[in-house]
Image (tube, grey):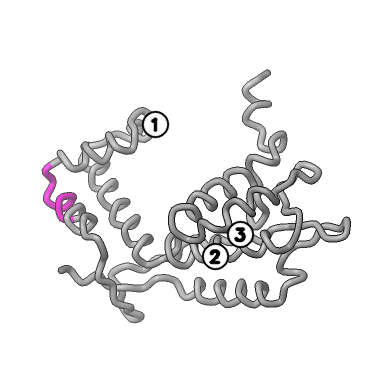
């Protein structure tokens, strides 16, 4: 098989699909989060109700689809898209830029080195700016304060959401089309997300 066929996403619709549909990758990392902290009690039921319908991952019925969708929304609000998470990634990105600009890292390092090796190299750089950033990142919780006028961190994170399909009486439906509660929840989340993350970091 040629490399073009192996890397063609159209041939592997279960592996990767555009949001808000489900795909193997999206299901995998969401259920891992559920098992770790969100809702371990829903994992088995979700797995038991996932099916392959014409090359697309959907649920056998509405209940598990709704549980999965709300669990994903919780991940977005409290983890992936939270101010804490986004500021931490912004700070790490700043440390990487400093390392690249000062030739402490070369661009090919991102292809030839593991994440842990890159972090170790940054920590060993003895660059005062990078050391300051890592001192902040080592804090268990960042002290962030909302600031609209002139924020230190002005971030517009990616809005992640799912809107899974499910079967009912032989037909396939999208959750938001049949569940007004979830449709309203999505609208509120999108509105909140549109305001972005504008915060100041108060050093301890």
Helix, strand or loop at disc 1? Answer: helix
**Is residue 96 found left or right of 193 in the rendered image?**
left
Quarter of the rendering containing residue 13 = top right
In the rendered structure, which disc, 1 or 3, sits on the residue that comes first in sequence? Answer: 3
Q: Main secondary structure of the magenta part?
A: helix
Helix, strand or loop for disc 2: helix
Quarter of the image containing the N terminus?
Answer: top right
What x and y, as percent, mark residue 19? 63, 55
- The reply to whether discs 1 and 3 touch (Cβ–Cβ < 8 Å) is no
Residue, disc 2: 73
Q: Is residue 93 magenta-colored?
A: no
* Quadrant placement of the C terminus: bottom left
| Residue furthest out toward the top | 1
Query: Which contiguous range is marked in magenta?
Result: 126-132
Residue at the (25%, 49%) spot, across then down: 95
Q: Residue furthest bottom?
A: 149
The numbered mark, 1 or 2, whose residue comes first in the sequence reads 2
The residue where tag 3 is placed is 68
**In the figure, is residue 137 to the left or right of 10?**
left
Which percent across, then down, holds residue 180?
Answer: 71, 76
Q: CA distance from mark 1 to mark 3?
A: 34 Å
State the residue position of label 1.
111
Q: Nearer the viewer, mark 2 or mark 3?
A: 3
Q: Is residue 67 left or right of residue 74?
A: right
Picture residue at 23% right of the left edge, 43% below the top = 99
Mark 2 touching mark 3, by CB under 8 A?
no
For marks 1 and 2, give the CA distance: 32 Å
From the viewer's perspective, is the residue at label 1 or at label 2 nearer?
2
The mark that comes first in sequence, 2 or 3, is: 3
């Amino acid at each position: 098989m040629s490399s073009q066929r192996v890397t063609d996403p159209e041939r592997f619709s279960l592996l990767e699909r555009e949001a808000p549909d489900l795909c193997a990758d999206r299901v995998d990392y969401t259920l891992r989060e559920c098992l770790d902290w969100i809702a371990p009690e829903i994992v088995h039921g979700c797995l038991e109700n996932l099916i392959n319908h014409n090359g697309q991952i959907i649920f056998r019925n509405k209940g598990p689809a709704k549980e999965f969708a709300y669990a994903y929304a919780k991940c977005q609000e409290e983890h992936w898209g939270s101010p804490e998470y986004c500021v931490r990634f912004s700070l790490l990105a700043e440390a990487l830029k400093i390392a690249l600009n000062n030739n402490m890292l070369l661009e090919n390092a991102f292809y030839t080195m593991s994440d842990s090796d890159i972090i170790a190299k940054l920590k060993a750089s003895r660059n005062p700016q990078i050391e300051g950033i890592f001192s902040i990142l080592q804090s268990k919780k960042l002290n962030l304060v909302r600031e609209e006028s002139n924020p230190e961190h002005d971030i517009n994170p990616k809005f992640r959401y799912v809107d899974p399909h499910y079967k009912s009486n032989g037909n396939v439906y999208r959750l938001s089309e049949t569940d007004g509660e979830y449709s309203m929840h999505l609208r509120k989340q999108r509105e909140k997300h549109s305001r972005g993350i504008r915060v100041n970091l108060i050093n301890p």
